[in-house]
Image (tube, grey):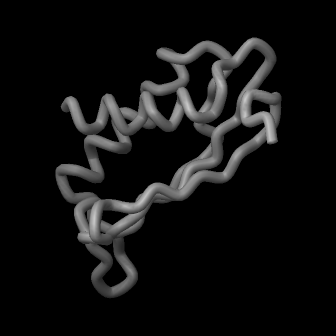
Amino acid sequence: YDYARTGFYFVTICSARRVPLFCTITAGRTRLLPAGSLVAEVLAELGSTLPGVTVDCSAIMPDHIHIVFSLGTGARPLAVAVHRLKSLSTTR
């Protein structure tokens, strides 16, 4: 499949060894941990760094993140968007 085609793509990214790095859930309430806050910031900025790529929605869970990417005309392939998210999050 050509993941550079326009459309919506659902991506799940898990932490290494499924360690709960991103948030805690207590009594039905979610509280972002520092790593989760950092990922949320990178997700918010991602569209401005990659033309044609939009983060349509996302959900940060304790040990994984769900993201819906929208690739428009002229957008870079999905792998570039995922790589940029991981790279920026790790660097920061």
Please state if 32 lies on the left or on the right of 86 as rendered. Answer: left
Q: Residue 16: x, y in percent?
A: 28, 62
Q: Nearer the viewer, residue 18 or 65?
A: 18
Q: Residue 66: x, y in percent?
A: 53, 57
Quadrant for residue 92, please give it: top left
Q: Residue 90: x, y in percent?
A: 24, 37
Give the residue furthest to the bottom: 27
- Where 40 falls versus 45 (above or below)? below
Q: Residue 88: x, y in percent?
A: 31, 29
Give the residue furthest to the front: 1
Task: Please name the residue shown 45% across and 33% down the image.
Answer: 83
Task: Please name the residue shown 37% across and 33% down the image.
Answer: 42
Quadrant for residue 89, please give it: top left
Task: Please name the residue shown 32% across and 77% down the image.
Answer: 25
- Where 4 falls versus 69 (above or below)? above
Q: Nearer the viewer, residue 39 or 74?
A: 74
Q: Quadrant of the N terminus?
A: top right
Quadrant for residue 74, please give it: top right
